[in-house]
Image: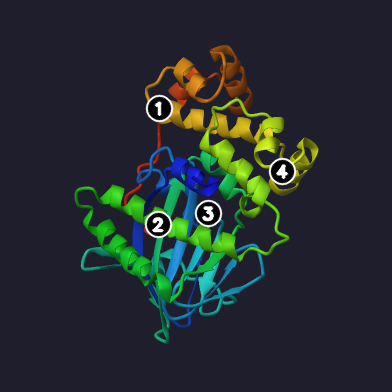
Amino acid sequence: MDALSEVLHAIRLDGALYLDAEFTAPWCIEVGFGMHTAANRLPRSEQIAFFHVLTDGTCRARLADATDVVDLKPGDILMFPHDHLHRMGSDVSIPPAERSEIVDKVGGMLRIQHGGGGATTRFVCGYLACDPRVCRPLFSALPRMLRVSIGDDAAWLLQMLRVGVQESHAQGPGARSLLAKLAELMFVEAIRRFAASQPPEQRGWLAGLRDRHVGRALALLHGDPAHGWTVDSLAREVAMSRSAFAERFVDLIGEPPMQYLTRWRLALAAQRLRTGNDTVARIAERAGYESEAAFNRAFKREFGMPPSAWRKSVREPVDGAPQVALEAPAT
């Protein structure tokens, strides 16, 4: 399996709250979902990516703290991997609407509706979440605002996202699992297309995937992270000299191979501590550590506390955690 598939498999994306959004020109909104809003829907989520899929009409968008504007057409996915505040509209230079002006309920279903009665623009909106440590390799390679065109060849995805809107409203048996799978499909398709669109001179994790040598090394590391990899053994596997491989890996990925591997092992271990019931010793073994003591030291350096204490902290209820009802993104 390739490194992107391995990372996507490990990320375990969760998704919720698909909304219909309809605007008529002239209109402008400012949006940021926020962890507080997701707390009730996706407890213990620490990384939120917010997305809009344009189904009808046109739209302009920019980050709230930037001036560069992108123009969207039907079939475009606009994603904010780190939930940055952003502005969207027929004209993003006009003052954005107040939140109270745009939220509506139609037949009991939550929608976002606003505008001056002109040309209509429609979106499917939602968010997905994951553990930031596990998604770090991928999410660190993504821009603050990411636009991908899925076009006519992925009309099936638009139809499935509309199903997501219906499931968000109905919340029938298995709805959460279905919504997570739909979010994952949309996310994977967007990332694949974004990676393919990057220029040859691009640096970062996605560029490393495309590189014949570094991409092979990433696939090996992610395919068998517990193996006793060394820079020498990786260099042999990808048919490069040790020095040339190490230099190329750092140039593209931004850190040495063994540091990258350590972070990935600990991220996987943290995920197992959070969600599984294996002993710390077993998790240490699965992470490629020869002793529990060595694993404990490495984990504490990365997370600031021993694995047993960290497991307890992420599993205990947080006093005063916000309980937020299903609602539209804040503006």
* Label whose residue precedes the other's in the sequence (1 or 2): 2
- Measure the alpha-carbon separation of dots 1 and 2: 28 Å
Amino acid type, residue under disc 4 in the picture: Phe
Name the one closer to the observer, 142 or 249: 249
- Disc 3 element: loop
Amino acid type, residue under disc 3 in the picture: Asp
The percent coordinates of residue 87 (x first, y second) are 54, 67
Please identify the quarter of the rendering in which residue 306 is found.
top right
Amino acid type, residue under disc 1 in the picture: Arg
Q: Nearer the viewer, mark 4 or mark 3?
A: 4
Mark yes or no: residue 330 visible: no
Mark yes or no: residue 290 visible: yes
- Measure the alpha-carbon separation of dots 4 and 2: 29 Å
- Measure the alpha-carbon separation of dots 2 and 3: 19 Å
- Asked whether disc 1 touches disc 3, contact meaning CB atoms under 8 Å apart, the reply is no
Residue 290 sits above or below residue 45 on the image: above
- Disc 2 element: helix
Q: Nearer the viewer, mark 1 or mark 2?
A: 2
- Asked whether disc 4 touches disc 2, contact meaning CB atoms under 8 Å apart, the reply is no
Q: Can you identify the residue that label 4 sits on?
A: 249
Tell me the residue at 53%/63% (across/down). 193
Q: Can you identify the residue that label 2 sits on?
A: 185
Residue 267 is labelled as: none
Q: Answer with left or right where residue 85 lies relative to residue 275.
A: right
